[in-house]
Amino acid sequence: MEAGVAGWTVRPHIVSGDDDKFAAFRLATAALAASGTVTLELAVAGTPMVVAYRVDQVAARLRFLLKVHSVVLANLVLGENAFPELLQEDCTGEKLAAALAPLLSETPQRRAQLAALERIPSRLLLDHGTPSERAAEVVLAALPTGRG
C-alpha cells in the first residue's frame, strides 16, 4: 500500500494495528462500513455510520432465511435500526452518498445516531465474567453431555 500511494500529492495515513484503527475510528466524523464486526467496533468508538453490503446472486436469494431485523451488529445490539443498511440493489454510489451526507454535519440524523451510540456500551456489559467466558458457556451448554 505504501508503494501504491507514494506518488500521491496528499499522503494518506495507512492504519496499522488495532490501536491505530480505533484511534482512526474515534477521529472520524462518519464511516461507510461493510456489514460485519466493524459495525460494532465503530459503535464502541462512537462513530456514526452507514452500512453497505452486496453478496452474489445465489447468497442474495437465500435472504429469506434471515430471521433478524438487521444484518448490522450494532443494530442488533440496540434492538432497533439506528444505522442505515444499504444492501444489494440499494448499495449504489448515489444512495450511499445520500445516506452519508447528513452524518457529516450537525443534522437530526447525526444527532439520532450519536444518541444511539451512547446506548451501545451499556448493552454490551455482562452480569458476570468476560465475553469469552460467556461464549464458552454457550458452547458448552449446546454440547451433548457425556461421550460417545
Image: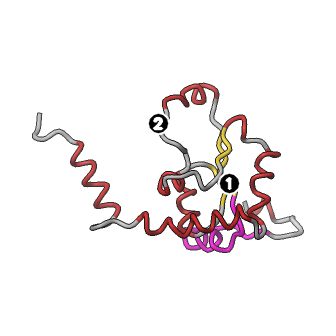
Kindly identify which residue carries mark 1.
Answer: 50
Mark 2 residue type: Lys
In magenta segment, residue 28 = yes
Please tell me whether mark 1 sits on a helix, a strand or a loop.
Answer: strand
Q: Where residue 84 appears, x then y in whole percent?
A: 65, 51
* Label tally: 2
Vertical order, 24 against 102 (above or below): below
Say which residue appears at 47% left-offset and 56% top-offset: 77
Kindly identify which residue carries mark 2.
Answer: 67
Asked if residue 39 lies left or right of residue 10, the reply is: left
How crowded pointer 2 is (Cα within 10 Å; few <14, some 14-19, many 20+) is rated as few
Query: Which corner quadrant holds the C terminus?
Result: top left
Start and end of the magenta stretch?
Answer: 12-31
Scheme of image coloration? secondary structure
Q: Where residue 80 appears, x then y in whole percent?
A: 53, 52
Say which residue appears at 47% left-offset and 36% top-offset: 67
Query: Which corner quadrant holds the N terminus?
Result: bottom right
In space, the residues marked 1 and 2 are separated at their CA atoms by 21 Å
Q: Nearer the viewer, mark 1 or mark 2?
A: 2
Mark 1 residue type: Val
In magenta segment, residue 78 = no
Judging depth in this view, the residue of 134 and 10 nearest the camera is: 134
How crowded pointer 1 is (Cα within 10 Å; few <14, some 14-19, many 20+) is rated as many
Q: Where residue 134 appears, x then y in whole percent?
A: 29, 58
Please tell me whether mark 2 sits on a helix, a strand or a loop.
Answer: loop
Q: Where residue 72 appears, x then y in whole percent?
A: 55, 50
